[in-house]
Amino acid sequence: MVTNVAVKPKRQYRGMTRWGRIFRNLGMLLPATILALLFITAIFAEWLAPFPYDETSLPERRMPPAWMEGGSMKHFLGTDNIGRDVLSRAIYGARVSISVSLLAIAITASIGTVLGIMSGYLGGRTDAFIMRITDIAMSFPALLVAILIAVSLGPGFFTVIFALSILGWSGYARIIRGEALRIRNSDFVAQAQVIGVSPWKIMIRHIFPNILNILIIGITLSIGTMILAEAAMSYLGIGIPPPMPSWGSMVADGRNDLDRAWWISTFPGILIGLVVLSGNFLGDWIRDKTDPRLRRL
Amino acid sequence: MSEIVLKVENLHTSFFSRQGEVKAVDGVSFFVREAETFGIVGESACGKSVTAMSIMRLLPEPSGQIVEGKIILEGTDLVPLSKKKMRAYRGRMISMILQDPMTSLNPVYTIGDQIGESVRLHQALPDNMVEPEIISSLRLLKIPTPETMLGNYPFQLSGGMRQRVVGAVAMSCRPRLLIADEPTTALDATIQAQYIALFQDIQKKTNVAIIFITHDFGVVAKICHRVGVMYAGKIVESAPTREIFKAPRHPYTSALINSVPRLEHKDERLYSIEGQPPSLLNLPPGCRFAPRCTVATGVCREEEPPEVDLGNDHTVSCWRVK
């Protein structure tokens, strides 16, 4: 009667070479490596950056990258219009971009999860109320609201996070409500009710663990969105105040020099694209792996 | 006669929909004694499960409500209890086994966690006492090697084992009343027989009163001491099992019993009752079964038959019984 079915999760790789395995998982390994490297860069910016982010050197302004004529190894990615090292600023910029978006994601995901679970599980008036607020949050133009907040509170690290969080939770609330609604009707929730578990405990112990995969996918996928939103705010000049670099403000700094010094905007732009793509690929990969309907047997 | 554990008196449960009031349970009364199994038999949508959900007070509110009646568990009426007090009864005093064992366990927790949840909730035990309690519940359900079972996840078990674990969750606080809502429907015939024997064994050991909901008279014959036959929200006949098989008094009861396939009648076509049960939105005047009844007369279509007590726990609502 006892069937301790030994499940072999690695079954699909049987008979494959090591390189074959690595190639199969490239969709996860590559974006995860890129994100991990940027994360490390952001943490150890002081040690990795060859120059301080605000050190100007007017004689060396608009120096091209090392591999171009007139470039030198001293400033590998060139310098900007007041002679600051682009590589160093991009490294420090990673810190701003990543910390802002991670904090904003933590806040939005938490709010969205709590509201989504309550809405989906409690239903009735609670659901109607939360969902109307969500509708309102979703119908506001996010960037416009962010500008309003930044203008009224004054620019700064926490203003940016606040501006990104105030509407960003609504997407999570929607998706998680849908999942909670589905799980509420499952038999193990009925079973928990039958043995007298309270609604709060059911939400925490039974609903939450079962929406975790959806939440993780949502978080990974929103890394890209948040980085972009932060970049957009910084580009518009309502982000982190200068001289602290962020990728978005670096793109903005270089926009007047695009014809003679393309590298000032291009390298931070490439970084933004790289992170957004990595986040999206990683999110897709996790979704494919955790969604049983898509799992290959 | 042993003590009465649960007494349901004139229970009315309705669902309020846009089309009007659906009287899912319309004046049901019955009782269950200690160490006794009471079967509720009837077709789909006759109100069996709603009766169970009313006793558990787990109706989908606000659309489903107990309109009238008493549900007395060991002297306490459950109907007026607050939600919080009712939660303390659920799992500890009354428990329930749901229909589908495959999905009644949360996939993210181990078996030990799931049984432990109920134990921790209702019994103020020190942490080191919880595990022995869980193991004893697993033993009660005759689950082999309970110590290793604790750490298993539901997906590692077979359907029959999961069914037993669900039983262990329900019995973990040794409730006085256990409601089993078609627990054998999803099982195949051999496991069904084992499972029924298991129920009888548990009852012998714990004296638990069981309400066994089923549509299968064959299962009733095996496990129930007494049976209530439900039709369109009412119990039309209630009697000890042996008596109901020997001398059914209500035409619906005899029709149901005749619908059970039997080996000795292998040449005949299986008997089936003509027609459909009435819509609970607008019930016919008179006896609910009259439109499908082969022996109905004028009075059956005009007035509802009263409940007649035939003595020896046998009651029936039919104009033909005097």
Image (cartoon, rainbow, N blue to C red):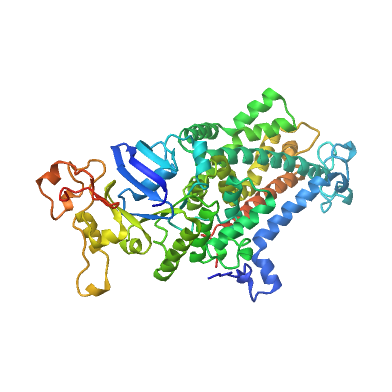
B91, A228: nearer the viewer: B91
Residue visible at 88% across and 50% down in the picture: A72
Which of the two residues, B199 or A86, is positioned nearer the viewer here? B199
Q: Nearer the viewer, residue A201 or B230?
A: B230
Left or right, A17 with reference to B298 = right
Residue furthest to the left in view is: B298
Q: Is residue A51 above or below residue A137?
A: below
Indicate the quadrant where residue A231 lies.
top right
Across and down, in percent, residue B249 comes to 21, 55
Residue A116 in view of the camera: no
Where residue A38 sits: x, y (%)? 76, 50
- Residue A146, x across and y down, in percent: 64, 30
> Which residue is farthest front?
B1
For image coordinates 24% across by 74% down, the residue present is B264
Tell me where residue A225 sits by quadrant: top right
Q: Residue at x 51, y 41 (%)?
A: B87
